[in-house]
Image: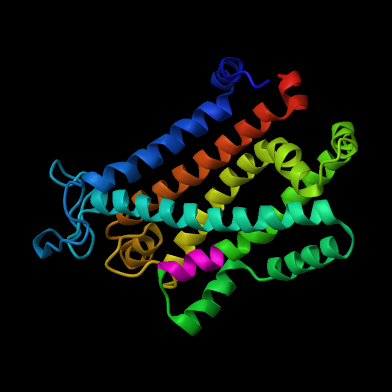
Amino acid sequence: MFNVLEFMRRALRHRSFVVGGLLTTIMLGMAALSVFWTPYSPTAINVRKRLAGPSWDHWLGNDPFGRDVFSMILVGAQNSIVVGMIAVGIGMSIGTLLGLLAAAKRGWVEEIIMRLSDFTYAFPVILAAIMFAAILGPNSINSIIAIAIFNIPIFARVSRASANVIWARDFILAARAAGKGAVRITIEHVLPNILAVLVVQVTIQFALAILAEAALSYLGLGTQPPTPSWGRMLNEAQAMIFRAPSLVIFPGLAIVISVLGLNLLGDGLRDLTDPRLSRQR
C-alpha cells in the first residue's frame, strides 16, 4: 500500500526532487500570477521607454517597442504551460492507449502499432510544425498538434514496454484464471502499475514541449503576435544582443529554469518510484 508520509519523507531528502520541485513551482506560480495580474499590459507599447534597462518601475526593463519585459515573461510562462500541457496530454492519452492495446493484444496488432509509431517518430517536431504551418498557417494550435504527434510514439513505446513487464507477472496469471478479460486486466492491474512510469515520462516530455514551443515561436511557426512567447522574445531580441543583452538573458533564463526544473523533478520521481533505486538510497 502506498504510504504518502513515507514518500514525502524520502522526497524531502532527495535533492533533485526538492530543487526540481522548487523551480517547477516558480514556473507554475509565474503562469498562475499572470492570469490575475501583471505589472503592465504585456502588449502595451511605450516608445519613450524603448530599450530602457531594469528599474524600479520596470524590473526587467523594456523591449524595442517599450513593452514591459517582466509582464511579457509572466504571460509567456502561461503560454508555454498551456501549449505543453495540452500537447503532452494529447500525446500521453493516445500513446498510452495504443501502448496498452499493443501489450494486451500482441501479434499483428502490436506489430502494426509499433511500426506506425516508428514511422511517426521519424518526423521531428520542427519538421511537422513546418508542414502544418505551410498548409494551415503558423499559430499555437499547429504547434500543439505537432508536439502532440511527436509525443504519441514516445508514450506508446514506454507504456507498451512497461505493460509487457506487468503482463508477465504471476498476479496477471491469477487474474486470467479468475476469468478476467484483457480489457479488465489492463484497467484494474496493468495501468495502475505503470502510472509511476508515465508520470515520470510526462515531466520529461513536458520539458521537451516547452523547448519545442520556444523553438517554434523563435522560427515564427508557433505563437503569433501580440501574444507573448519566450521563443519569440529571443527572436526579437537577437538583433539587440549587444545593445541590450538583458532582452536575451531574461527569457533565456526563464526557459532554462523551466526545463531544468522539470528534468530534475523527473529524475527525482524516477528515483523515488523505482523500488531498486529507493532501496539503494
Residue in the picture at 80% in, 48% down: 182
Q: Position of residue 63 (x, y in %)?
A: 23, 60
Q: Quadrant of the N terminus?
A: top right
Can residue 70 be seen here? yes
Dominant secondary structure, magenta: helix
Q: Is residue 104 left or right of residue 62?
A: right
Q: Is residue 246 left or right of residue 86?
A: left
Q: Nearer the viewer, residue 64 or 145?
A: 145
Residue in the picture at 62% in, 18% down: 3
Q: Nearer the viewer, residue 239 or 103?
A: 103
Q: Position of residue 226 (x, y in %)?
A: 27, 67
Q: Is residue 207 left or right of residue 65?
A: right
The boundaries of the magenta stretch are 140-147
Can residue 218 be seen here? no
Residue in the picture at 35% in, 51% down: 78
| 205 vs 231: above or below | above
